Image (cartoon, rainbow, N blue to C red):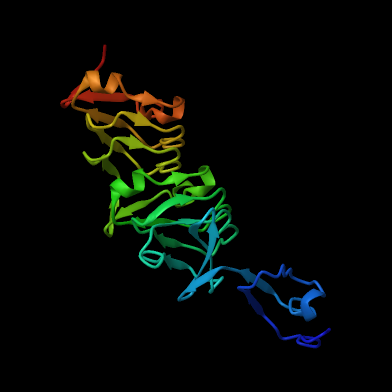
């Protein structure tokens, strides 16, 4: 009944079973009675743990809870994957995170209270524009404020020509964004895509009719909510 009695030095329990194991409870032989941390997962790749949600893999946790830099896996056994809600919440020690183009969605509050985060690194801007962020704290930019593409910090953003839609919360909180160029390929921009981009000064477009036809989902989907200057083919629109 008490298979783990007196295991006072037990730090971590990794649960791959169907048992419901909760920290401090006496059930299941007292396995979690003394444990400081419980990780429940369906699979593990290296130090990364995954849960299956609606049949899709999601990162749920990283083994080293005190890590200051995280580089997410390139894929989940060759598949794209998501980041589970609250996956990295409450980790003020986290400073830098690298997100590959295989991440397709990020759950609610995945980066909640990651106040120490200063850098977000990506390798594919088009893939980033297509990530489904579930809220402002799902986007690490809401804390980091600085975005790096292939190791180089961006302050001037040019939306790639293969992007037709910019998702919700895509650039939320990116206060270090200064200039934005949007081509005629973009037909829709999700709500809060440019929310809190208070440093944005200029928006550049090449096709005014195409700009007028963009489906903006809300006030913070339009970058002109913060930028006060719009340029068409290099010429500022003042009337």
At 35% from the left edge and 35% from the top edge, which residue is drawn?
200
* Residue 219 x, y percent position in the rendering: 45, 25
15 horizontally vs 184: left or right: right
* Residue 226 x, y percent position in the rendering: 40, 29
100, above or below 221, in the image: below
Total marks in image: 0
* Residue 168 x, y percent position in the rendering: 44, 37
Q: Image quadrant for the N terminus?
A: bottom right
At 40% from the left edge and 66% from the top edge, which residue is drawn?
73
At 28% from the left edge and 60% from the top edge, which residue is drawn?
151
Q: Quadrant of residue 182?
A: top left
Q: Image quadrant for the C terminus?
A: top left
Q: Quadrant of residue 21?
A: bottom right
Q: Is residue 24 something that shows in the picture?
A: yes
Q: Is residue 154 something that shows in the picture?
A: no
* Residue 3 x, y percent position in the rendering: 78, 87
222 horizontally vs 115: left or right: left
Q: Quadrant of residue 5?
A: bottom right
Q: Nearer the viewer, residue 66 or 10?
A: 10
Q: Nearer the viewer, residue 201 or 45?
A: 45
Residue lying farthest top? 239
């Amino acid at each position: 009944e008490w298979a783990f009695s007196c295991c006072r030095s037990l730090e971590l329990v990794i649960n791959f079973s169907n048992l419901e194991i909760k920290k401090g409870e006496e059930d299941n032989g007292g396995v979690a009675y003394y444990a400081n941390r419980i990780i429940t997962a369906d699979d593990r790749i290296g130090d990364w743990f995954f849960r299956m949600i609606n049949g899709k893999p999601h990162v749920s946790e990283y083994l080293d809870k005190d890590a200051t830099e995280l580089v997410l896996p390139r894929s989940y056994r060759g598949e794209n994957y998501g980041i589970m809600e609250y996956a990295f919440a409450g980790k003020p020690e986290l400073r830098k995170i690298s997100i590959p183009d295989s991440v397709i969605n990020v759950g609610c509050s995945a980066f909640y209270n990651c106040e120490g985060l200063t850098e977000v690194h990506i390798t594919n801007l088009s893939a980033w524009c297509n990530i489904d962020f579930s809220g402002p704290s799902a986007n690490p930019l809401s804390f980091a404020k600085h975005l790096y593409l292939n190791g180089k910090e961006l302050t001037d953003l040019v939306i790639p020509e293969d992007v037709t839609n910019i998702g919700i919360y895509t650039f939320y909180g990116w206060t270090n964004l200064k200039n934005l160029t949007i081509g005629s390929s973009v037909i829709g921009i999700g709500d809060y895509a440019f929310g809190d981009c208070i440093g944005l000064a200029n928006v550049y477009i090449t096709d005014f009719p195409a700009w007028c036809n963009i489906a903006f989902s809300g006030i913070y989907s339009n970058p002109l909510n913060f930028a006060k200057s719009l340029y068409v083919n290099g010429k500022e629109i003042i009337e």
